[in-house]
Amino acid sequence: MMMKFNDVLERLKEYDLLVSHDDFDADFSYISYDSNDVKEKTLFVCKGVTFKKEYLESAIEKGVICYVSETDFSVSIPKIIVNDSRKALAVLASLFYPDNLFKIGITGTKGKTTTNYFIHNILKHHLGYKPGILATHYFYSGKDEGENHLTTPESLELHKHLNDMMNSNIEYMSMEVSSQAPKHDRVFGMKFNVGCFLNVSPDHISPLEHSDFDDYLNSKIAFIKECDTVIVYRHTDNYDRVISAVKDKKVITFGFKDADYIISNITNEEGLSFEVNGKTYKISMAGRFNVINATCAIAVADLLDVSYENVIKGLMETTVSGRMNVFYGGVCPVIVDYAHNELSARALYESLKEDYPGKNIKVVFGCPGDKGINRRKDMGLLAGEFADYIYLTAEDPGHSTVKDICSDIIKYIEKYHNNYEVIEDRKEAILKAIHDATKDDVIALLGKGDENYQMIDGEWLPYETDIVVVQNELNKVKE
């Protein structure tokens, strides 16, 4: 795979990114922004506020022959100066790794991953092969599959995945688009055939993420403005603002009333059964909010003329590890869910109230240390309002202490009651909740899902996952 110098200049000019350049006449056989990932004839993009000249000098020794930067580093190789290196990386990544895929993007404060898997499984039955997928913790490109570390990968990795999909004769792909993706230009220059807007509520607001809610919402809106067709949840907060931003697009709505796709008659019998526009569907996942996610996938399927039979098959086979996983075997149900913000936690609590009437809700959760500081208030107030007993514990404390984070949360729980205790070790907290339980309870473990790490003191440390902790303990009960 080769990329010509003049083509690089033309692509940068197309997006008004080019400031100046040295004369140069060579082809590039690789593109990178990581000094540890360099080959011969590499075009190197210098990005990030912490980028240092030493990184570029190290990369030159390994095979970089030209660099792209906002800064002239006065080194021995030619330069291309741009006004935005992140945007430059995105458009050059798409030049080096082109694709012709039908792209479906999903954004929302909650439900992105589940909706993505619903769409993926429906398309699998429709197409007769696995379509491409980029999910929060998983990707499949036809060439490779494995674990993701960002909800939306950095632009270079993203376009490489898309190119691999095309080269594997995959025609369709679905992906989650986080609020950080537009903010940090990971999807800059990308056009999506379909964009799904599930919901929005304040989240990821911190010095390291979004400065305020407007910044957060604007990032999500920036994504859907790059979509040909937009599918919007009719009852999302800020609905009018979202719709006004895409009034020049084809817009499809879904919800419980005043929508193109209307949900009705939800029943809970060995899975959730529901109707959309008079047709009956069923999902195996718990959580009534997952009916909303499934309906979004149904709207996407209709756009692509997927048969009713294939939609049914795709919906029913969808389960997502760490999302509303219900475990039995003890004295009461234990639910593991990734809910970690106000919108997802509220939906979970409301679903528990409906699905387990009369049960005492006992919850195990914490909040992160380095991001989403607003979650401490939101999660504390919700737990105080809905939970009968609370076990506060670690959830990626980062550079903070679990004790300090829990103290912040407690201030909000105590507006409702004092039925809580702090157990800093997450595994110990889960085991205590299971051992304390009676048949009149339902236990919910929030925040980590199937994540197999904890962020502690700036390091990703192994953690066996909430699911494994629960399964091991319930297996002991059976023995």
Image (cartoon, grey):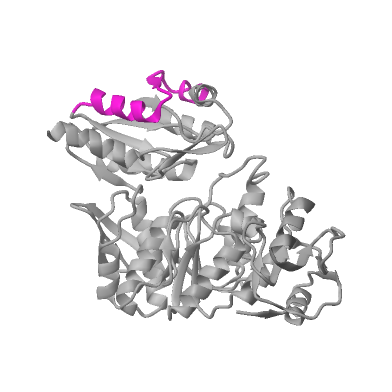
Q: Which residue shows up at 65% across the image and 58% down it?
A: 34
Residue 25 visible in the picture:
yes
Residue 170 drawn in magenta: no
Quadrant of the frame with the N terminus: bottom right
Residue drawn where x is 62% and y is 73% of the image: 94
Please, which residue is most extreme toward the front here? Answer: 61
Image quarter for residue 469?
top left
What x and y, as percent, mark residue 377?
53, 31
Image coordinates of residue 162 in percent, x first then y, are: 52, 72
**Residue 233 image offset from top left, x and y in percent:** 46, 60
Give the magenta-colored segment's residue range.
411-438
The answer to whether 226 appears left or right of 325 in the picture is right
Q: Where residue 318 sits: x, y (%)?
A: 30, 60
Q: Is residue 244 visible?
A: no
The quarter of the image holding the C terminus is: top left
Horizontal side of residue 226 vs 348, given as left or right: right
Pick the residue in front: 466 or 177: 466
Find the residue positioned furthest to the left. Answer: 479
The residue shown at (57%, 36%) is 458
Magenta stretch contains residue 434: yes
Q: Quadrant of residue 304?
A: bottom left
